Image (cartoon, rainbow, N blue to C red):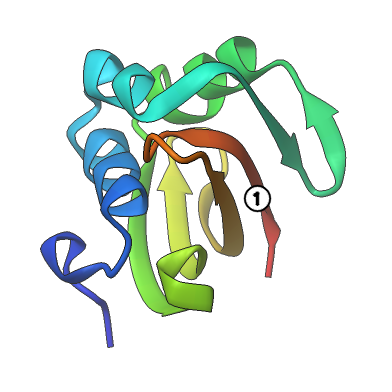
Amino acid sequence: MTIQVAKLSHPAVRDFVGAVNAHDRDAFRAVLASGATMTDDGSKRDLDDWTEREIFDSHGHMEVDNESQGGLALVARYSNDSWGEMRTKWSFTVDGDGRITRFDTGQA
């Protein structure tokens, strides 16, 4: 069963998923801390290049199936125009200001 974005537990993660699904670059960048980093399948990626290619240019969309670790870990069906749909895992590190400093994603 899919968890509605508005019902996700952690505010920063809720804003992240909402921005991805709305294809809202400004809202997406607003939830990230300055200097935020990310990995995809364990490999460090350039955050700006990866998000443009994997989220915004290819119409990325997340359907969250479950969450754990206080909402900082998700399992989601992620789809985009490049890869179709795949089961993915996401984990987030959030700073004291409530902004994401790092996220890690990969196939679940």
Q: Name the element at disc 1.
A: strand
Quarter of the picture holding the N terminus: bottom left
Judge by depth and name the residue closer to the eye, 83 or 4: 4
Residue that numbered label 1 is attached to: 105
The spot of residue 42 in percent (x, y) is 86, 47
Q: Residue furthest front?
A: 96
Where residue 43 sits, quadrant-wise, is top right
Residue positioned 60% across, 57% down in the render:
91
The spot of residue 32 in percent (x, y) is 44, 26
Judge by depth and name the residue closer to the eye, 2 or 13: 13
Judge by depth and name the residue closer to the eye, 14 or 82: 14
Q: Is residue 10 above or below residue 100?
A: below
Q: Which residue type does callout 1 highlight?
A: Thr
Residue positioned 37% across, 40% down in the render:
98
Residue positioned 26% across, 78% down in the render:
2
Q: Is residue 1 above or below residue 44?
A: below
Does residue 84 appear to the left or right of 57 in the view shown? right
Quarter of the picture holding the C terminus: bottom right
Q: Is residue 71 above or below residue 44?
A: below
The spot of residue 37 in percent (x, y) is 68, 26
Q: Could you classify mark 1 by the number of other residues whose Cα lies within 10 Å: few (under 14), some (14-19), or many (20 or more)? A: some
Does residue 8 appear to the left or right of 37 in the view shown? left
The spot of residue 88 in percent (x, y) is 59, 62
Q: Residue furthest left?
A: 6
